[in-house]
Amino acid sequence: MTDTSLHRSLPNRLDNPLKSAVLSWESLLVVVVVAIFILNSFASPYFLNAWSLSDLTFNFTEKALIALAMALLIIAGEIDLSVAAIIALASTMMGLALQYGADTPTLVAVGVGIGILCGAFNGFLVTGLKLPSIVVTIGTMSLFRGIAFIILGDQSFKGYPATFSWFGQGYVWWVISFELVLFLVCALIYWVLLHRTNFGRRIFAIGNNDVAAKFSGVRVDRIKFILFCLTGLMSGIAAVLLTARLGSTRPSIAEGFELEAITMVVLGGVSILGGAGSILGVVLAALIVGLVTFGLGLLNVPGIVMTIFTGTLLIVVIALPILFRMWRQRA
Amino acid sequence: MSRLLKHREVFLFLAILLVLVLVTARFPRFAQPGNLLTIFNDTSILMMLALGQMAVILTRSIDLSMAANLALTGMIVAMTNAAFPGVPVPLLMAMCVVVGAGLGAFNGVLVWKLNIPPIVVTLGTLTIYRGLVFVISGGAWVNAAQMSPDFINLQRAVFLGLPLLSWFAIVTALLFWVVMTRTPLGRSLYAIGVNPTASVYTGINVGRTKFYAFVISGAVAGLCGYLWISRYVIASVEVAGGYELTIIAACVIGGVSIAGGIGSVAGVLLGAIFLGVINNALPVINISPFWQMAISGTAILLAVVLNARGERRQGRVILKKAEAV
């Protein structure tokens, strides 16, 4: 009785397809994106400019990359709160490798490798020992960041090679940054993975009812393990991008990323209880968060105040359809 | 003995004793009553917050906004005190409880009336409350010089050998114990966590009970807002940043099941004390503070692993009498 309003992005196939497409969660998000875009362009003369729009993408790509994998994990009914800590650990290990004279390919391999390892550790604790993921990842969150603190203390690693910095600062073509291209490619891959493969279908099945999924032959634990490895992998990639962009590693790097990534996922219409959601929604939500923070930045709104807007947006966008439905039922 | 060990509380108590013994073996002064009372006092705020969190987690919900609530109420009360030093401190504390409960009620209404999952609601209000701290303060700090002496000293006053802060924790714990074990509300909180559908059929209003749980956690967070600010004599935007997860960690170590319905006041107190003892022991045995996070992380993981053995997917029997018949 409490869960009726949560499967909002799962279209009913018996409905008129055009009508359900127009009334879908994604189209609501598109309206929000367009509205914020128009608001921004009126609010600041510096907004509609190729370079400033390109800067905008740096606001959200790293978190959005994690959000892609997190979406799959949440659809499967699990969650990973340790992603920001994985970034910190992967970044620290890259810095450590740098002290031993690692070149750029090695640095990237270390960052991504540590990410996958951390994800696999989470995955093992959740699937192997049958523990609730929210608690496990609260623990590994302290553990991973703690190891980063042990290694770094109050120091920081600097002096990354120029070729490495390209990952966070380079442009593929004119104003199109490498980060943006990577994000779009990953979004496409995740879209295919979730919506066009049996693997994706099984993720939905697990999220809707993992016992039923198990009895219909889905290897629930193996898929959940893979999904934890995927969030680890994306956190590793985000660590490479973020470290390259900032040019330094501190143990407090990426603090709060986990909540922002989850905000993107939930805003994107993924049910926090699992079983429903789409990659398109997550990409749109990432764009919304990016547009809002960038627009507010142009208006000189301090970073912490921006969080009020993202928080309010999260609650309002989710509450609106529910209020609308309640109002319609009453009328 | 083995049956006793199955009780989470006994196990935790022994674990805490073990840490105390190990540390005391090298530093005899650690286990002196004075130091133990200091540790208790240091942990008081965490204990209270964890109790509030427990009320919410029991109902299969979670409150991620507690630390932000604490920071916001703390800032409000600190600014009030700085602007009007004449206002008596008990009145300010009442204000804290009311404001905190109001912020909690906002969470609760969204969960109750709109059926939005608690984790989403409190994720949103976490950022909103934290942002509001900046808005009302303009990013400025309220420091010790701006606070009135009464405001700072009240919780340091010693009563029967214990600072008032410790007494707040003790009274809160007693209140929670009474509510959890002796009132219909406490029973409803457990019942909802064990089986929400069955609770509806027994006449419990699930939504409203969750609302009450959020009001309780909010009120506790509000009171702790005053206690935190007056203890560390600084109010800023960063107060208790990231502390929401420490609160949940204390609950988890104390044996509260994140799936709802399982948990005890004594367990949560011991969970918080366990974190407090570890944090106090590390500097004593010359371990760098940078290790602290990794060690608490390991402790959380160990606690979760132990927790999962045995208690998983089993409700706790609420009606002991009915069982005996």
Image: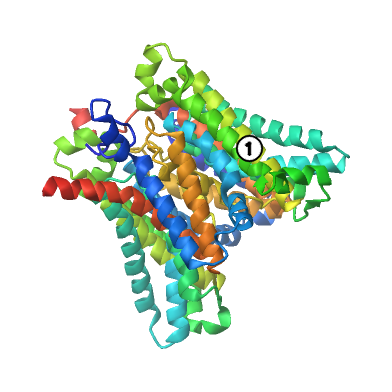
Q: Residue at x 64, y 56 (%)?
A: A51
Colour scheme employed for the rendering of this structure? rainbow
Label 1 amino acid? Answer: Leu
At horizontal 84% and vertical 50% (from top left) the residue drawn is A159
Question: Quadrant location of the C terminus of chain B?
Answer: top left
Say which of B282 and B288 sits in front. B288
Q: Position of residue B203 (x, y in %)?
A: 14, 41
B287 displayed left or right of A217: right
Residue B80 screen position, x and y as percent? 42, 80
Q: Chain of mark 1?
A: A
Compare residues B32 and B98 and report the one nearer the observer.
Answer: B98
The residue shown at (28%, 33%) is A18
Where residue A74 sits in the image (x, y, percent)?
A: 45, 34
Secondary structure type for disc 1: helix
The image position of residue B309, as x and y in percent, is 46, 26
Q: Residues within 10 Å of mark 1 (few under 14, many from 20)?
A: some
Q: Is residue A292 above or below residue A109?
A: below
Using the rendered image of the protein, determine whether residue B239 is visible from the camera's viewpoint.
Answer: no
**How many circles with numbers are drawn on the protein?**
1
Please indicate, yes or no, whether residue A111 appears anywhere in the rendered image: yes
Left or right of A7 in this view: A71: right
- Furthest toward the left, the residue is A331
Asked if residue B298 is positioned above or below residue A287 in the image, the reply reads: above
- Up the image or down, B96 lies above or below A252; here it is below
Q: Quadrant of residue B263?
A: top left
Q: Which residue is mark 1?
A: A182
Q: Foreground residue, B157 or A196?
A: A196
Q: Is residue A253 left or right of residue A305?
A: right
Q: For residue A303, what is the image quadrant?
A: bottom right
